[in-house]
Amino acid sequence: MIKPNFKIPKKVKKLILKYYPENERVHEIYFTHCVKVTELALLLIDLNPKLKIDRKKVIRCGMLHDIGIITTNAPGIGCFGDLPYVAHTYKGREILEKEGFAEIADICEKHIGVGLSKEDIIKGKLPLPHRDMLPETLEEKLICYADKFYSKSNRHLHIAKPMEKIKAKLKRYGDDKYDRFKSFRKLFGSNFYEHL
């Protein structure tokens, strides 16, 4: 089991264990992914002290941004729900609102890809509520950015994806998506691989 280099608040740990019991395969995948995303986000905070980002909020957001995956049908990572994977966004928001984390519930919707506009959702006929799901705060943008470097697949669960791989994937969804990613890269930087 991965050991985070930061302290996870007790309430956050308790919530994770409620939905992702330690004895289930999905726990290790969920926990590892969220730890890696959070560690990268904290590293980027350290590399950008002028941005004055709320570390405690970033830890909560980083560890809970994917809380909704358990409701989806993704057996490859141990999720046996009945919803399409993309639905983990709004289901995660619902979970956090119900469990007393309403102040950070938006992160669940706003971390997907580089964020989705209402127009993206309608045009793409995505099974999501018709509303903007775009990161707005520095903390939301940071988690969205850090999340792009780690997946829940074996290959990039522990090792950050190369920038070119992220670029290629985002460009498949349109230049505007890659442009948004570039704005995050400009804001937070990309000279962090040597610190991982």
Image (cartoon, rainbow, N blue to C red):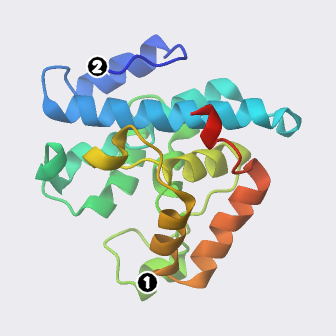
Q: Which of 159 and 124 is in front in this view?
A: 159
**Helix, strand or loop status at disc 2:** loop
Q: Residue 9: horizontal and vertical position, in percent?
A: 50, 15
- Cα distance in 3D space between marks 2 and 1: 40 Å
Q: Which amino acid does label 2 sit on?
A: Met
Residue at which label 2 appears: 1
Q: Can residue 17 be seen in this view?
A: yes
Residue 173 spot, x, y in % from top left = 47, 80
Confirm whether residue 102 shows in the render.
no
Q: Residues within 10 Å of mark 2 (few under 14, many from 20)?
A: few
Which amino acid lies under the numbered mark 1 shown in the image of this protein? Answer: Ile
Q: In this view, does 193 lie above or below 17?
A: below
Answer with the quarter of the image where residue 169 lies.
bottom left
Residue 82, quarter of the rendered image: bottom left
Residue 3 circle label: none
Q: Is residue 150 above or below residue 117?
A: above
Crowd tier of the residue under label 1, counting other residues whose Cα lies within 10 Å: few below 14, some 14–19, many 20 or above: some
Q: Nearer the viewer, residue 108 or 101?
A: 108
In the image, is 123 to the left or to the right of 138? left
Residue 190, given in percent of the width and then of the height, sits at 69, 51
Q: Nearer the viewer, residue 17 or 174?
A: 174
Q: Where is mark 1, residue-wise?
A: 122
Q: Is residue 159 left or right of residue 49?
A: left
Quadrant holding the C terminus: top right
